[in-house]
Image: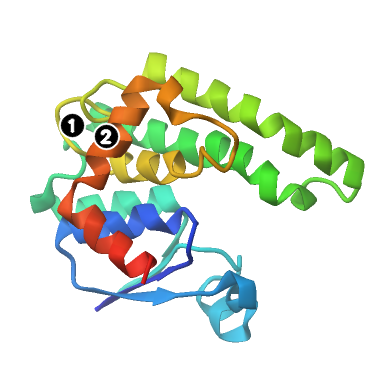
């Protein structure tokens, strides 16, 4: 059986939702970051990066959200979580890569500025910039990337749980999601999905 390692408030939520949407049999394993579970020798054997998500499969361990999401979509094709057409799948990967490489780091500067600087003044400057940076990212998503009604258009894909996860961070980042009507509507429709409700029950439990 698959095993997904996750922690509250992290991007692991996206992979957890995708597994549920795919109808996969899996075991969710919660890590408590406040207790530094991600730095224990046992977990570092799973993921030496000391981060989540990490997905244990029969063939080995996968890390990084875009990789895990793509694996889920291709392993459970009956769930139709990604297009078969190579170019369209490339578009899915491009969107998820943008969330991973740009939007997530923009958010991380608020709570993890120490990754980029040891200077307290520099850290405060980075933190102060987070609302602007996240707003600019979402303006681009809203105006140029989001096809609607789902990220890639009519079909729900692995882009949707990932965008939903990051959208859930906006309020704490000082950004009102209501300023982005498409993203706001997307967030509300995601919360109505049975798979999302099931996973949130675990995360809030």
Which of the 4 image quarters holds residue 58? bottom left
Name the element at disc 2: helix
The numbered disc on residue 144 is none
Crowd class of label 2 (few under 14; some 14 to 19; many from 20; radius 10 Å): some
Q: Is residue 75 visible?
A: no
Which of the 4 image quarters holds residue 89? top left
Q: Is residue 15 above or below residue 120?
A: below
Q: Is residue 61 visible?
A: yes
Of 103 and 77, which appears nearest the observer?
103
Q: Residue furthest top?
A: 143
- At x 45%, y 62%, the residue is 53
Q: CA distance from mark 1 to mark 2?
A: 6 Å
Q: Residue furthest left?
A: 78
Per the image, the residue denoted by label 1 is 85
Tag 1 and tag 2, C-beta contact below 8 Å: yes
Per the image, the residue denoted by label 2 is 89
Q: Is residue 50 left or right of residue 124?
A: left
Tell me where residue 184 appears, x and y as whole percent: 35, 29
Crowd class of label 1 (few under 14; some 14 to 19; many from 20; radius 10 Å): few
Q: Is residue 152 left or right of residue 64?
A: left
Of 23 and 1, which appears nearest the observer?
23
- Work out which quarter of the rendered image holds the N terminus and state it: bottom left
Tell me where residue 81 appears, x and y as whole percent: 19, 45
Tell me where residue 80 appears, x and y as whole percent: 13, 45
Q: Is residue 1 above or below residue 177?
A: below
Tell me where residue 62 appears, x and y as whole percent: 41, 63
Q: Is residue 191 left or right of residue 109?
A: left
Of 185 and 85, which appears nearest the observer?
185
- At x 25%, y 42%, the residue is 190
Name the element at disc 1: loop
């Amino acid at each position: 059986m698959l095993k997904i390692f996750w922690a509250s408030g992290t991007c692991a939520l996206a992979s957890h939702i995708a597994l549920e949407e795919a109808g996969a049999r899996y075991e969710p394993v919660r890590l408590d970051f406040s207790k530094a579970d991600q730095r224990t020798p046992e977990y570092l054997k799973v993921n030496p990066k000391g981060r989540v998500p990490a997905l244990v499969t029969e063939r080995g361990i996968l890390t990084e959200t875009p990789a895990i999401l793509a694996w889920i979509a291709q392993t459970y094709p009956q769930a139709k979580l990604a297009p078969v057409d190579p170019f369209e799948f490339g578009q899915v990967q491009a969107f998820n890569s943008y969330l991973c490489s740009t939007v997530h780091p923009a958010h991380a500067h608020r709570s993890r500025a120490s990754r980029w600087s040891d200077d307290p003044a520099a850290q405060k400057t980075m933190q102060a910039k987070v609302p602007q940076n996240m707003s600019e990212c979402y303006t681009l998503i809203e105006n140029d990337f989001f096809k609607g009604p789902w990220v890639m258009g009519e079909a729900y894909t692995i882009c949707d749980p990932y965008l939903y996860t990051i959208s859930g961070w906006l309020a704490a980042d000082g950004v009102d999601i209501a300023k982005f009507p498409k993203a706001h509507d997307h967030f509300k429709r995601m919360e109505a999905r049975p798979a999302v409700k099931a996973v949130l029950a675990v995360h809030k439990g």
